[in-house]
Image (cartoon, grey):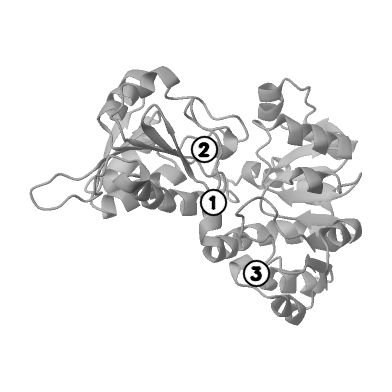
Amino acid sequence: MHIGCPKEIKPQEFRVGLTPNAAREAIAHGHTVSVETRAGNGAGFTDEDYIAAGAAVLETAAEVFASADMIVKVKEPQSAERKMLREGQLLFTYLHLAPDPDQTHDLLVSGCTAIAYETVTDASGGLPLLAPMSEVAGRLAPQVGSWTLQKANGGRGVLMGGVPGVGPAKVVVIGGGVVGTHAARVAAGMGADVTVLDRSLPRMRYLDDVFSRDFKTMYASAGNTIEMAREADMVIGAVLIPGAAAPKLISRAQLSEMKQGAVIVDVAIDQGGCFETSKATTHQDPIYDVDGIMHYCVANMPGAVARTSTIALSNATMPFMLALADKGWRQACEDDPHLLNGLNVHAGQLTYYAVGKALGIDVIAPQLALKA
């Protein structure tokens, strides 16, 4: 199979879909790899690194899309990229379709087969291709939140760990999954007073057993959520419903109940955000003010640490990429039902229920797509 990796063109996105090591592995399996020139620069990988691995370096994205049977990326294809997709081509990347009707429409029209990293599952019910970036985003959230909390950036001017005689920042993390756990650990490590809200009692028991010395837990009822948000200096939104739009947990009206200069970090912004006032921002212009509450809603947070993120993501995606290339997508998905869960679009039809429900589009079962 011919595997192609274009340069990411989303603003301030420095990651790359294939590392030189991943290219080398694919070539060792008998496949051909083409990479757009300078695709890896943002993550510290040069064209020479890819050439040494055996890959071809092409001058334009158009050449990569035209030659490849499978396109491997990081972020969802942008409008210009979607126009280059073709019928029968395989796209393997993050998609986040539920809040993005335009992308969904374009993928359906293209006739491509699109497998989304964020909906591939594993035997334990986890999301193995989302987890590495959730870990990165979770660990980044308190860092970027503490920067936003500084007075010069519009925040309350509160130091995360306080100082002797002055209490620490109060941080509320909504969601106790991968993002929330990593965010809470880092915020607690910075000295903040941290509470994690979640609706799963088993998950809260686990967090309490393992991290009770670091942070507290509380049930995420609507009443508890707004009560904790009123007292918080920082609220980190870390709620995920796989493949679906994120639920709105704090409304515009409820912002007035929060402290002036408090900070919201919405890690769920790729899925539409979990605050009513959230809108996607970039690393170049990451924050904005709504009613005195500072919002940090960068849609590709892990891109800020592109080298770490790229290597972590490649470690997770490589086995699935090789299976798709070695067997073809149909056989690979037939052999691995967890990979089949990643199928979102095939030949003009939507194959992921949560996306169809969010966008009001008819869906066929992915098993039927395998037989089509």
Q: Mark 3, residues whose alpha carbon is within 10 Å: few (<14), some, or many (≥20)? A: some
Q: Report the residue marked by disc 2.
A: 268
Q: Does the rendering let one see residue 247?
A: yes
What amino acid type is highlighted by mark number 2?
Answer: Ala
Q: Which mark is residue 41?
A: 3
Judge by depth and name the residue closer to the eye, 304 or 357.
304
Q: Mark 1, residues whose alpha carbon is within 10 Å: few (<14), some, or many (≥20)? A: few
Q: Is residue 259 left or right of residue 95?
A: left
Q: Of marks 1 and 3, which one's residue comes earlier in the chain?
A: 3
Q: Does the rendering let one see residue 347?
A: no
* Place of residue 314 in the rendered image (x, y in percent of width and height, measured from the top left): 63, 62
What amino acid type is highlighted by mark number 3?
Answer: Asn
What amino acid type is highlighted by mark number 1?
Answer: Gln
| Front position among marks 2 and 1 | 1
The answer to whether marks 2 and 3 mark residues whose Cβ atoms lie closer than 8 Å is no
Quadrant position of residue 9 = bottom right
For the point 64% across and 41% down, the residue is 119
The answer to whether marks 2 and 1 mark residues whose Cβ atoms lie closer than 8 Å is no
Q: Report the residue marked by disc 1.
A: 284
Of the 4 image quadrants, the one containing the C terminus is: top right
* Place of residue 99 in the rendered image (x, y in percent of width and height, measured from the top left): 64, 31
